Image: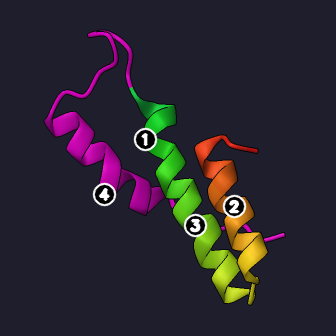
Amino acid sequence: MVIKDIRRTFIEDFCVRAIQCNAQYEGRYLLGTSLARPVIARAQMQVALEEGCKYSCIEFIKASAKGDS
């Protein structure tokens, strides 16, 4: 099991920009979960590559991130 602290990336790369543009869904819902998904997927891919994951594993992670699995 690998646990990465990606809070700084989440805040700096996604939350700050979302706050700057007042990002909301249907004018009232904040986008925390939808903003977090790309950060989590990126971290999964980094770990997969660091661990020497093969093509089929990476394709599974991509499909999971899109909700295809």
**Amino acid type of the residue tagged 2 in the rendering:** Ile
Q: At x 43% / y 41%, what residue is drawn?
A: 35
Q: Local crowd at mark 3 within 10 Å, few (<14), some, or many (≥20)?
A: some
Question: On screen, 8 above or below 47?
Answer: above
Residue 61: mark: 2
**Mark 4 / mark 2, whichever is N-terminal:** 4
Nearer to me, 61 or 16: 61
Q: At x 69% / y 61%, what residue is drawn?
A: 61
**Mark 1 / mark 4, whichever is N-terminal:** 4
Residue 68: mark: none
Distance between the alpha carbons at the discs numbered 1 and 4: 12 Å
Look at the numbered disc 4 and give the secondary structure of its residue.
Answer: helix
Instruction: Indicate the quadrant containing the N terminus: top left, top right, bottom left or bottom right.
Output: bottom right
Q: Name the residue under label 1.
A: 35
What span is colored magenta in the figure? 1-30
Q: Local crowd at mark 1 within 10 Å, few (<14), some, or many (≥20)?
A: some
Nearer to me, 61 or 44: 61
